[in-house]
Amino acid sequence: MRSTGNTDWVRGMVCVAALASGCGAAPRDGDSTVGGVVASSSLRALEVSNPEARLLSREATRATFEIRVLVTHENEDAVTIRHVRGTLSFDGLEVATLQIEGPQQLDADAERVFVFEVHVPLSLLATVRGDTFTVRGALVADGGSGDGALVTPFEFTEPIPR
């Protein structure tokens, strides 16, 4: 059963990352662990879904957006998220790099919201012809080994909040 009480948010900034330090994966008895490390090959892929974007503020020279995604982990063992990296594009033009650095532990059968705060110059926003933005990236995790072998790519296109 998925943990629904976990309301932790992991925040990242454009080109600036902030995460609390985490620890390795929780040990578990069984064939998939060696010394408290879960073999990445025994883990199912994570899921990145439910993108949401909102306009936080509009100042004289820039707009600040918040982009949230839900990361779902449906495994019997905890994973260690090493980093989340991506790009934000308007009209096919890459305007920002999104980044959250780890390590950050995600418990077994749990979910967590990742939040990117993005600052976009109003001059750039004024040139956008389309009504959508695209975020592409990957979440890199493992079972505590440090190898980052569990890679979850993601891509979504959403309306630009105005």
Image (spheres, rainbow, N blue to C red):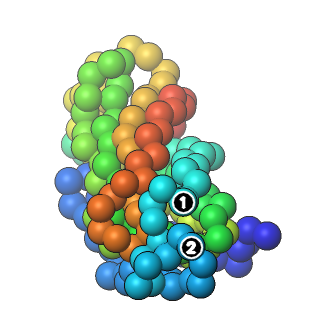
Q: Secondary structure at mark 2?
A: loop
Q: Which mark is residue 70?
A: none
* Identity, as a three-letter code, of the amino acid under mark 2: Asp
| Count of labels in the image | 2
> In the rendered image, is residue 152 in sight?
yes
* Identity, as a three-letter code, of the amino acid under mark 1: Ser
Judged from this view, the residue extending furthest toward the front is 31
Rendered image quadrant of residue 22: bottom left
Query: Residue at 74% of width from left, 68% of height from top?
Result: 2
Query: Residue at 43% of width from left, 30% of height from top?
Result: 134
- In the displayed structure, would residue 27 be above or below residue 40? below
Q: Secondary structure at mark 1?
A: helix
Judged from this view, the residue extending furthest toward the right is 1
Query: Residue at 26% of width from left, 29% of height from top?
Result: 94
Q: Position of residue 148 (x, y in %)?
A: 33, 58
- Left or right, 20 with reference to 162: left
Neighbour class for label 2 at 10 Å: few (<14), some, many (≥20)?
few
Q: Which mark is residue 42?
A: 1
Q: Are marks 1 and 2 in contact (CB under 8 Å)?
A: yes
Q: Which residue is mark 2?
A: 31
Q: Position of residue 91 (x, y in %)?
A: 35, 18
Nearest the viewer among 61 and 128 is: 128
- In the displayed structure, would residue 104 be above or below residue 89? below
Q: Position of residue 55 (x, y in %)?
A: 47, 47
